[in-house]
């Protein structure tokens, strides 16, 4: 194939030359629609960058000529049909029309105006009509003005090429409206010193244009988002000493680094974008002069603000960016993270004190890998790569940059602080949190931390003192911290050296057997009031449910040591019993049985007695209870798993225990309730409508709804010892039951059912 080529401009295409004379440009049928005016984030970026290049060439203070590479096509009977370069030629056509309008250079007889589309008749007609029209200087939005012209057809709103041209005209106007149109036009069409040029390749024996087009497009791919971003980034830092170094690293050492973390597409573009996005965000938080965007922005806008000339600290940010990449080059990345962390699903052979368990939902312990794969992704409004992961990865980066000693202890403390600071990990606090991480990693300065959960900071300082005095207990303490129910917080444990090791073993044994948790909730109540008050009417207990195990975290963590004193005392007693016992199940049952027998002998059947004796009263998987009047007693609401308020259905534990005792009969409504804890909660017999509910002195019974049962119900009132107000009192002393109200309530309902009610 012989190729005729020449360097030319858009207007220069039409000048006489030694090759075929070009009299018009026609985009052939095989081409796609004009795309540079489409509206999407990626195309917006491409469009803006291209217009900026054109502006700097013809309208900038110091014009810089630009070469747009090659335009490839064939000339047939004086008509150039481009196979490559359609998008650039169309944009140049629109720019020529815009500047010619402003410069008063728009006679339609000019050769460059012979530009049209064969892809759609509507696009052809639009181009023909456009060059016959001059854009007034006073127009604010060219697209609106064009649409208002009498020659503009309403149906053209469905033509993607025309709509893209209108978007491009608005974009050109936005960038060029303050330019001197006459001066810009003269530069654009200057044949001696062309401002915008390209190489025209016009093979004389190219064969079928369609075949060649297919071959070209099967080889080529559009620029990726990363390639566009990289070009923009390199432009942002071109005035710095590191521009060349960045270009070399992106295509060299950094690309080699990320190759090991590439996705299924065998590209590292996404990984680059995610990691650079992470570093950019860190720099935004670390630099007080950089305004952090409230809403998502294009990556190039953010990097321009952080690493571009507008930031007086750009050198510092660039230095951090380079170090954040270079620190991994030539290093076993997996090995670094495996040496620091372990996952909670790993099968352990022995305890590795130097490896800290991570509890993130993403089980990858290689945080660099996790960042490259998920940074920037969201699930609803939640970040997939969490703030906690961001902080911990930052800590590892700083450790490797500084070469710090004793990093395991500092990383462990940081893990503990992150897990305890769910309320503190917010975007507005990240600058302070990063500064705390910096101090902790660099100096081990726990006492200076002021942005993480304060109770946990105090607990970390206590543990530090405790282990300094008792280094032999380090492994036991770390094993507790790495337990999934505690996640670094051990405020519910007495720091008592002589018993700490045994209690830690007992707790880990109990935590590993969720089938024993329901018995554990009863045994804990038997040894003390272990619950925590979360407000004046809401109480947190443990749970028998593995699925809702977070109830144990709500109970055992998240408060200072004073607030956990009752929980800590009861837990210590139970763990001591487990430590001396043989079988866990039998130990828990024995603790409950012995305590129940003691209470029965004392005739002291308070709320704890019933909660321990009747497992149904501990069925609520949330471990959350509400009480009337703020004191635990004979009126309680028990929430199911996954709920924390009374907005959805819940149980009354006393009513439920009676229903369970009766065998969950079908002739009694399944007792679910809604509403405030002060509302009455009845156990209702379906046949007669008779209802019964526990009250402080015993039970209240409400008569039948159908009159058919009134006589039968009346005959039973005396037998049941019911007052005129429907109250059945039970024996009490100082407001505390001396007989089992659940057993009595069960018998009352059984009699009602047996009598046909």
Image: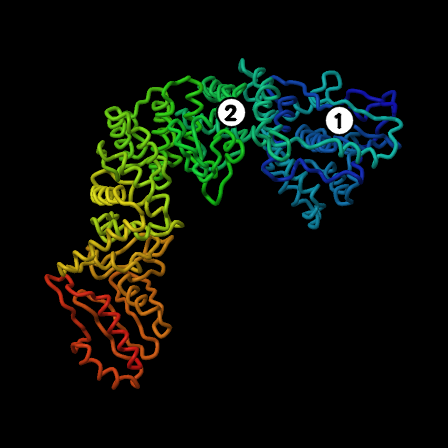
Q: Quadrant of the C terminus?
A: bottom left
Above or below, comparing residue 716 to residue 175 in the picture: below
Residue found at the very far left of the displayed protein = 734
Element carrying mark 2:
helix
Q: Which residue is mark 2?
A: 333
User: Residue 496 vs residue 753: left or right?
Assistant: left
Q: Identify the residue shown where x is 24% and y is 51%.
A: 591
Above or below, comparing residue 678 to residue 501 in the picture: below
Q: Identify the residue shown where x is 46% and y is 43%.
A: 381
Quarter-wise, where is residue 466 in the image? top left
Q: Which residue is mark 1?
A: 10
Mark 2 nearby-residue class (10 Å; few <14, some 14–19, many ≥20): some
Relative to the observer, which residue lies in front, 192 or 235? 235
Q: Position of residue 590 (x, y in %)?
A: 25, 52
The answer to whether one can see residue 15 in this image is: yes
Residue found at the very far top of the displayed protein = 241
Quarter-wise, where is residue 467 in the image? top left
Label 2, label 1: how far apart the Cα atoms are: 52 Å
Quarter-wise, where is residue 146 in the image? top right
């Amino acid at each position: 194939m012989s190729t005729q080529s020449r360097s030319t401009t858009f207007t220069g295409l039409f000048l006489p030359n030694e090759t075929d004379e070009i009299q018009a440009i026609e985009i052939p049928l095989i081409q796609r629609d004009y795309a540079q005016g489409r509206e999407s984030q990626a195309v917006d970026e491409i469009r803006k960058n291209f217009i900026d290049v054109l502006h700097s060439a013809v309208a900038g203070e110091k014009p810089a000529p630009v070469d747009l590479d090659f335009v490839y096509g064939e000339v047939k009977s004086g008509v150039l049909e481009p196979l490559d370069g359609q998008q650039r030629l169309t944009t140049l056509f629109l720019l020529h029309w815009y500047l010619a309008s402003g410069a008063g250079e728009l006679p339609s007889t000019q050769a460059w105006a012979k530009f049209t589309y064969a892809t759609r008749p509507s696009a052809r007609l639009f181009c023909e009509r456009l060059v016959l029209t001059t854009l007034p200087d006073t127009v604010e939005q060219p697209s609106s003005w064009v649409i208002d012209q009498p020659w503009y057809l309403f149906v053209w709103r469905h033509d993607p090429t025309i709509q893209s041209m209108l978007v491009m005209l608005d974009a050109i106007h936005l960038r060029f409206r303050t330019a001197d149109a006459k001066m810009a036009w003269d530069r654009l069409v200057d044949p001696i010193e062309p401002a915008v040029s390209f190489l025209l390749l016009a093979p004389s024996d190219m064969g079928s244009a369609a075949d060649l087009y297919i071959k070209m497009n099967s080889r080529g791919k559009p620029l990726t988002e990363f390639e566009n971003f990289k070009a923009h980034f390199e432009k942002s830092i071109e005035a710095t000493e590191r521009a060349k170094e960045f270009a070399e690293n992106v295509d060299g050492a950094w690309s080699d680094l990320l190759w090991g973390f590439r996705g299924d597409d065998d590209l590292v573009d996404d990984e680059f974008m995610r990691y650079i996005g992470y570093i950019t965000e860190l720099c935004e938080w670390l630099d007080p002069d950089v305004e952090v965007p409230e809403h998502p922005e294009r990556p190039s806008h953010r990097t321009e603000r952080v690493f571009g000339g507008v930031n007086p600290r750009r050198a510092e940010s660039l230095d951090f960016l380079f170090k954040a990449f270079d620190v991994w080059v030539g290093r076993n990345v997996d090995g670094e993270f495996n040496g620091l962390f372990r996952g909670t699903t790993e099968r352990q052979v022995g305890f590795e004190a130097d490896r800290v368990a991570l509890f993130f939902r993403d089980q990858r312990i290689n945080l660099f890998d996790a960042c490259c794969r998920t940074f920037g992704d969201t699930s609803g409004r939640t970040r997939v790569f969490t703030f906690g992961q961001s902080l911990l990865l930052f800590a590892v980066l700083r450790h490797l940059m500084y070469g710090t000693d004793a990093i395991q202890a500092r990383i462990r403390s940081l893990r503990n602080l992150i897990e305890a600071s769910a309320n503190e990990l917010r975007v507005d606090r990240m600058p302070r949190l990063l500064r705390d991480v910096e101090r902790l990693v660099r100096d081990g300065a726990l006492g200076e931390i002021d942005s993480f959960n304060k109770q946990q900071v105090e607990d970390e300082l206590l543990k530090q003192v405790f282990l300094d005095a008792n280094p032999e207990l380090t492994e036991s303490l770390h094993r507790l911290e790495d337990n999934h129910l505690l996640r670094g917080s051990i405020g519910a444990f007495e720091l008592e050296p002589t018993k700490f090791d045994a209690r830690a073993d007992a707790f880990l044994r109990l935590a590993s057997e969720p089938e024993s948790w329901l018995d554990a909730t009863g045994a804990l109540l038997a040894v003390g009031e272990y619950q925590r008050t979360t407000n004046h009417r809401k109480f947190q207990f443990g749970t028998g449910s593995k699925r809702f195990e977070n109830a144990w975290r709500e109970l055992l963590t998240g408060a200072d040591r004073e607030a956990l004193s009752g929980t800590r005392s009861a837990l210590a007693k139970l763990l001591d019993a487990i430590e001396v016992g043989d079988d866990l199940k039998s130990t828990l049952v024995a603790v409950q049985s012995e305590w129940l027998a003691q209470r029965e002998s004392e005739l002291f059947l308070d709320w704890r007695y019933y909660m321990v004796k009747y497992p149904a009263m501990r069925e609520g998987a949330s471990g959350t209870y509400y009480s009337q009047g703020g004191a635990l007693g004979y009126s309680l609401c028990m929430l199911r798993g996954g709920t924390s308020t009374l907005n959805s259905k819940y149980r009354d534990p006393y009513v439920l225990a009676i229903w369970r005792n009766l065998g969950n009969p079908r002739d009694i409504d399944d007792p679910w309730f809604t509403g405030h804890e002060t509302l009455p909660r009845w156990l209702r017999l379906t046949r007669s409508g008779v209802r019964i509910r526990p009250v402080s002195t015993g039970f209240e019974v409400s008569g039948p709804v159908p009159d058919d049962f009134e006589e039968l119900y009346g005959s039973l009132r005396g037998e049941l010892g019911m007052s005129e107000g429907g109250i059945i009192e039970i024996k009490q002393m100082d407001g505390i039951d001396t007989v089992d109200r659940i057993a009595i309530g069960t018998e009352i309902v059984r009699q009602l059912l047996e009598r046909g009610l």
